[in-house]
Image (cartoon, helix red, strand yellow):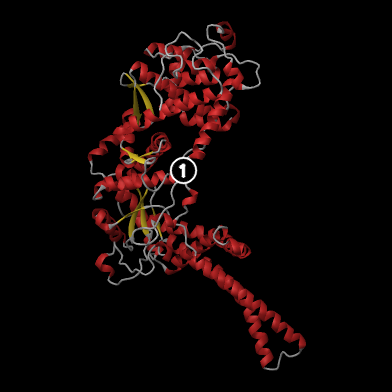
Amino acid sequence: MGSEVGAQAARARALAVLRIRGRALAVALLPAAAAVILVAGGTSDHLVGPGWDAARAVVSAVALVVLLAAGIIALVVARARPAVSPTVPIAEDAAPDLYRLVRDLAERLDVPAPSAIALTPDCDSWLEDRTHPAHGPPAREERDELAGAAGGRHRRTAAPVLVIGSPFLWWMRVGELRAVLAPVVAGTGPSAHPDIAAARRFVRGLDAAVATAADRGRCPAFRPACAGIGWVARLLLRSCRQHAAEMERGVAAAAAERAQAVDYGVRIVAQEQVGLAYAGWDRLLTRVALPAWRMGRWPARLDAGVVAALTELSRRDRLAEGFASRLGERPACDLLEEPGTVDEAASLLAARLFHGGPAECGPDWAPVDWSEYPEEVVDRKWRTDAARLHRVLDALGVRRAPDPTVHDPNGPTLTRVLDHLTAPDRDDPEPSDAGATAASPAATSDADTDAKPPSRDPATLDAEAEAEVEADTDADTDADLHPDEDTPRAPRTAALAARLSAELAREDAAAPPAPAPGASPSGQAGPDALWDVDALPLFPLQPPRTERELLTDHVTAMVCCAAMDTAGAQPGLDWLDGPTLLVGGERATDLAPRVLSLVEDGDPDPLRAWLSDLGIRPEKPVRLV
């Protein structure tokens, strides 16, 4: 270990953790020591008599129980499987240039090279210790892949694994990736110190023991024993929590200090790309990938989509104009032999982590290419939502066409939705009765005039449409701060939103569960066996949609279906906003505020004016799924 201040502080904290382990061992051995003293005193005729005999028997029995309990706890701590991050392993023959880059970087930093490289579908990089027997075949000995022939002797890999965020490989250039990885790779130096490694193993073992004891299905017949093991492990974790945290801070400080001599100027610029990649990755997952996952499709080129999304951002945002010029340099994904295959594996893992999808492809879980996204995802999503909306209207007893003069009165039309959301509410206690006895628009035009709020100026709606793209996050935050606004105001609208939410919940409950992961062809447990697949999704992207959001999405889908079937509009993909409607080849960015005016205020005039301007006929039936 080097002479960095952080490294010395990390070693001091590691020794503090080990002292806590030593104190716990001393407490476990204390009754045994007392029993040895009493037995020795009896054999030497110093501690004799009925009282001492009783004390020897009691203390010896207590010592045996404590030793047995301590042995069981120590065995659980040593054998419990520590948590491991879900990653995509990258073999050296699949990325020789990437391994060579990391090996050269470790040599420049004068630290041990990582044992292997893996990718994670996230914008982060770290070192992960996977030397526990549960993380690999126990009987197999392997050579350090990065150390190569210099390692010499065969041993179980002791150096940590380098985990790299897959978006970095596609968005960053080779020099930027090297600069970003320098402080991460430098962390292998302090990690190799015996005291720090022992302290980390002890903390990871305690954490794994707590998880093992909390798993009731793993030891149903020994729940009292599991509860005791968990209590002791949590007590020890609380005792060494602060020391372990300070130890990790010291290791990070030492790694950062050592890495200052390597590409320091480039790293300052590369950190800007880290933040930009994170923003683009988050936007791509929540706006583009999530709708596809909900439709049973997973984009197979998510990392390539990050480049497209950030390029689109640089085109729209003048602050990002300089980032597009970087695309002429060599991307870091060129360090992989087959970038497409790696991107597909990382994309499937992202779908599992963020959505909880199956581990393998199937008829209801298939990959989709970006060129097929508008037809396979956007069109199907809109038509599925529109079909669900009309099924709920049928369940509420809403007639197919209040106006008998329209063409094909039995077909699903946008007019049916507009009339139901704008018709005045009756005093009937049941929403279905109100929907079944709703009068035609011609018969209720006077009442509509009195009941509807005043229409808003079209210029104001255009301004709102421009602000909608910029303020989506603020709107979501405001909705969380004001939960009363999550429910539509009108009773008829609220009833429709509630039925939509219930229908969607029933569909989700009826969906078949993801198949359990199986063993690999070699007979060893697959990668999924190293982490809890029952907890999927591990990182949900968004909270459940509110009833108002569900209704707004379904009404928007119905409007888009009418636009596609009657006005020649096309489904499209916007890299920053996800599914979008293309009218004349241009994005329809002014639709959202008009739909909100209908859903929240019951005012259809802005939406009807928009439909009329684009030649969309709401009275014509649309094609549903």
In this picture, residue 494 sits left or right of residue 340:
right
As drawn, 26 above or below 617: below
Res 456 seen here: yes
Task: Note whether residue 15 is visible.
Answer: no
**Where does residue 281 sit, x and y in percent of width and height?**
38, 40
What residue is drawn where x is 51% and y is 14%? 419
Q: Nearer the viewer, residue 253 or 38?
A: 38
Viewer-closest of 180 and 333: 333
Q: Amino acid at mark 1?
A: Pro
Mark count? 1
Residue at the (33%, 33%) spot, across then down: 373
The residue beneath circle 1 is 512
Q: Is residue 490 above or below residue 48?
A: above
Q: Most extreme residue toward the bottom, as rendered?
A: 45
Left or right relative to 375: residue 596: right
Q: Which image quadrant: the C terminus?
A: top left
Where residue 182 appears, as percent x and y from the top left, is: 33, 54
Q: Position of 27 compared to 81: left or right?
A: right
Whether 36 is drawn above or below 232: the answer is below
Q: Position of residue 149 (x, y in %)?
A: 24, 67
| Quadrant in the rendering for residue 3 | bottom left
Callout 1: SS: loop
On screen, 456 above or below 248? above
Front position in the image: 555 or 135: 555
Return the residue found at the far right. 50
Dot 1 crowding, Cα within 10 Å, few <14, some 14–19, many 20+ = few
Which quadrant is home to the N terminus? bottom left
Q: Position of residue 425 (x, y in %)?
A: 61, 16
Q: Is residue 531 left or right of residue 583?
A: right
